[in-house]
């Protein structure tokens, strides 16, 4: 599983990345976590607000710092 | 905050950008409102094409603003057809600008339209 956190590096983006790492840790799953901080790459995906979360290439949330529980719910599918 | 951060753009602005002076005014107003920090202009075509990043961005917005040039309201209707209910709908001809096939716009018209929309945005 590939998880991408889209954001240029502000506090909200860092908060989402932190929660993603915590969710992955709590679930004990094998996942690659990638931080995408290029504004050009973010917009290339059509994302108009940050932070955003992509799971296996699909944008699943935009503009919110999801909680650890919310992320766990998305990861469990 | 990082440079070019998009996290403060809480209003998603969509414009008709149609083939008339008021359609072009709608787009120019969306750009100007974005530049002034009143939201972030987004892509109506991306909504109708179901581009996931763009639809997810609209879903994540605190408010959706639809700016149409004329009473045909193609922007609002497109958003609604795709399941998005705008929180604010603006029709530029209702602000006193007459529709014409001339695509040129004036700075004065743009100022009037942007000021009017900013006033209406205060309620959302």
Image: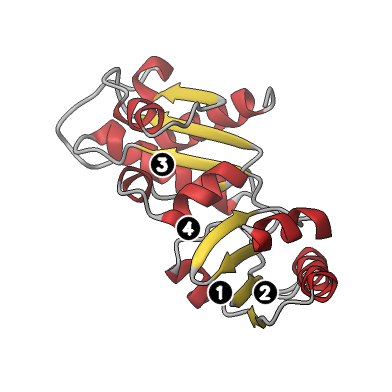
- Judging from the image, mark 3 belongs to the subunit labelled B
Crowding near the residue tagged with mark 3, few <14, some 14–19, many ≥20 C-alpha atoms within 10 Å: few
- Which is in the foreground here, disc 2 or disc 3? 2
Residue B103, position in %: x, y?
21, 41
Q: Residue A53 carries which label?
A: none
- Judging from the image, mark 4 belongs to the subunit labelled B
| Residue pointed to by mark 4 | B53
Dot 4: element: helix
Quarter residue B88 falls in: top right
Q: Could you tell me if the residues under marks 2 and 3 are in contact, i.e. CB atoms within 8 Å?
A: no
| Residue pointed to by mark 2 | A8
- Which is in the foreground here, disc 4 or disc 1? 4
| Residue pointed to by mark 3 | B107
For the residues beneath circles 2 and 1, the answer to whether they share a chain is yes
Real-space Cα distance between discs 4 and 2? 16 Å
Front residue of this view, candidates A23 and B120 = A23
Residue B3, position in %: x, y?
68, 74
Quarter residue B14 falls in: top left
Q: Residue A39 carries which label?
A: 1
Dot 2: element: loop
């Amino acid at each position: 599983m590939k998880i991408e956190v889209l954001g240029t590096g502000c506090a909200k983006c860092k908060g989402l990345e932190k929660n993603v790492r915590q969710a992955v840790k709590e679930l004990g799953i094998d996942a690659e976590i990638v931080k995408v901080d290029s504004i050009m790459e973010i917009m290339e995906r059509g994302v108009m607000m940050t932070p955003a979360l992509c799971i296996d290439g699909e944008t699943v949330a935009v503009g919110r710092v999801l909680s650890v529980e919310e992320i766990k719910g998305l990861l469990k599918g | 905050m990082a440079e070019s951060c998009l996290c403060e753009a809480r209003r998603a602005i969509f414009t008709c950008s149609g083939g008339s002076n008021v359609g072009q005014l709608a787009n120019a107003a969306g750009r100007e409102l974005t530049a002034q920090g009143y939201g972030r202009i987004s892509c109506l075509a991306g909504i109708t094409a179901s581009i996931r990043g763009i639809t997810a961005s609209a879903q994540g917005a605190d408010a959706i603003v639809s700016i149409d040039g004329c009473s045909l309201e193609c922007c609002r209707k497109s958003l609604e057809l795709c399941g998005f209910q705008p929180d604010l709908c603006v029709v530029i001809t209702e602000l006193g600008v007459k529709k014409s096939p001339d695509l040129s716009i004036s700075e004065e018209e743009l100022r009037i339209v942007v000021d009017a929309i900013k006033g209406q945005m205060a309620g959302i």
